[in-house]
Amino acid sequence: MSSEEKRFFRRKVIAGVEHRRDPLFGSWTRINPDRARRVKHTGETSRGTELAKLIESSRETCPFCPGKRDQETPVFHADLISSKRLKRNESVLFPNKSPFGEYHGVGILTNAHYVPMEEYKEQTIEDSLLLTQEYFHAVHRKDSSACFPVYVWNFLPPSAGSIVHPHIQVLLESRPAPIIEVLTRKCRRWHEERGEEFWTTLVREEREQDDRVICEREDAVVVASFAPRGFREILLLLPGSGSLADLDGGQVKAFSRALVRLLEAYQAMGVGSFNLVSYSAPLETASPAFPFHARIISRPYPRGIYTNDTGFFERMYDLWIIDTLPEEIAREARPFFSAPSSS
Ligand SMILES: [Zn+2]
């Protein structure tokens, strides 16, 4: 193996395009910041106006607004969970009407029909995570084969979110998603071959480079991904944690604090839509090889007709084309972690 191949962060520039290899998965990302400046025959319309119209036009028929949700959202089977819906402050969790997985639930985050990204409170995220944990454990008590937790947040339609009202989706499945399976295998092999957990190596290498670290604390590390699979991709890692279902109160707070600041940073960058995806070990298994982490990526701004951010390479070729440098994202996000949080 050449010294270049042994390097943790592998990058090379070919014809003005930077190719980066993900240190764990081995997948390749191509970054060309010039693409952000290319001519697009869409996007000339005013941003805020269309979003404001979407918020208002969806309000009247929203099934998640207080007053409607008790009539329009499904309830749990009494033999699974005795209450119709789980509740904690403004968070409400119930079965998904159109599931695509096992024990697929939906969690409403707020009573408000729309909350701008920069106005989310740490308490809102905390309530949602604690309620999700309650749901996971209730399901697992009835069906011990369901043990792989998923927590995802699609923010507005460009992220594939069909309902404007703030909500997350949760699943507890008997089989891991393919990426979780690969992640588990690769993390185990990394440890066997090098005698160190991948995540320990990652944090050390990022610290040494210092141009993608947004925040490093004992309880949470936030880094712009070296080889992103999505625009403005940011990793949020809770070192030493186990499954999402078993995070303790301090870990839930650390995650909520970091996420609220990331949303403020995204808003400042002009982001209008995002996906948050979680990566969790199975319930009741704590392995240092697989700490709980999440990734957030931006999606196109919500407006009528836009140029999609995902093309043939991403959909069918397993190649990721990105037009913003991770180092630039880290530079823009960092200030939001040095100031006291607004919530
Ligand atoms: Zn609503």
Image (tube, rainbow, N blue to C red):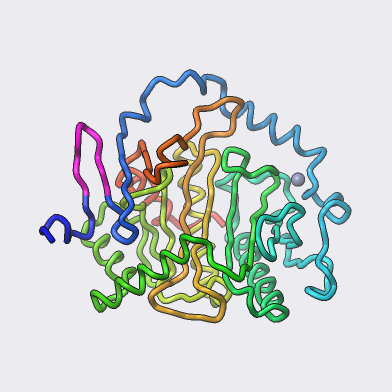
Could you say where residue 168 lies in the image, as x and y percent from the top left?
A: 64, 55
In terms of depth relative to the viewer, which is nearer, 83 or 51?
Answer: 83
Q: Residue at x 21, y 52 (%)?
A: 10
Task: From the viewer's perspective, tell me whether residue 134 is left or right of residue 147.
Answer: right
Location of the N terminus by quadrant is bottom left
Q: Is residue 150 magenta?
A: no
Q: Is residue 245 above or below residue 304?
A: below
Judged from this view, the residue extending furthest toward the front is 316
Task: From the viewer's perspective, tell me whether residue 332 is left or right of residue 14.
Answer: right
- First to last magenta residue range: 11-20
| Occupied quadrant, residue 86 | bottom right
Location of the C terminus by quadrant is bottom right
Could you say where residue 245 lies in the image, as x and y percent from the top left?
A: 58, 73
In terms of depth relative to the viewer, which is nearer, 185 or 225?
Answer: 185
Q: Residue at x 41, y 49 (%)?
A: 233
Q: Give the quarter the ligand 1 occupies.
A: top right
In terms of depth relative to the viewer, which is nearer, 245 or 98?
Answer: 98
Judged from this view, the residue extending furthest toward the left is 3
Q: How many marks?
A: 0
Task: From the viewer's perspective, tell me whether residue 146 is left or right of residue 63.
Answer: left
| Occupied quadrant, residue 133 | bottom right
Q: Residue at x 80, y 65 (%)?
A: 85
| Occupied quadrant, residue 99 | bottom right
Q: Residue at x 65, y 67 (%)?
A: 132
Q: Is residue 13 magenta?
A: yes
Q: Is residue 219 above or below residue 277?
A: below
The dominant secondary structure in magenta is strand
Judged from this view, the residue extending furthest toward the right is 71
Q: Is residue 224 above or below residue 247?
A: above
Could you say where residue 48 lies in the image, as x and y percent from the top left?
A: 59, 29
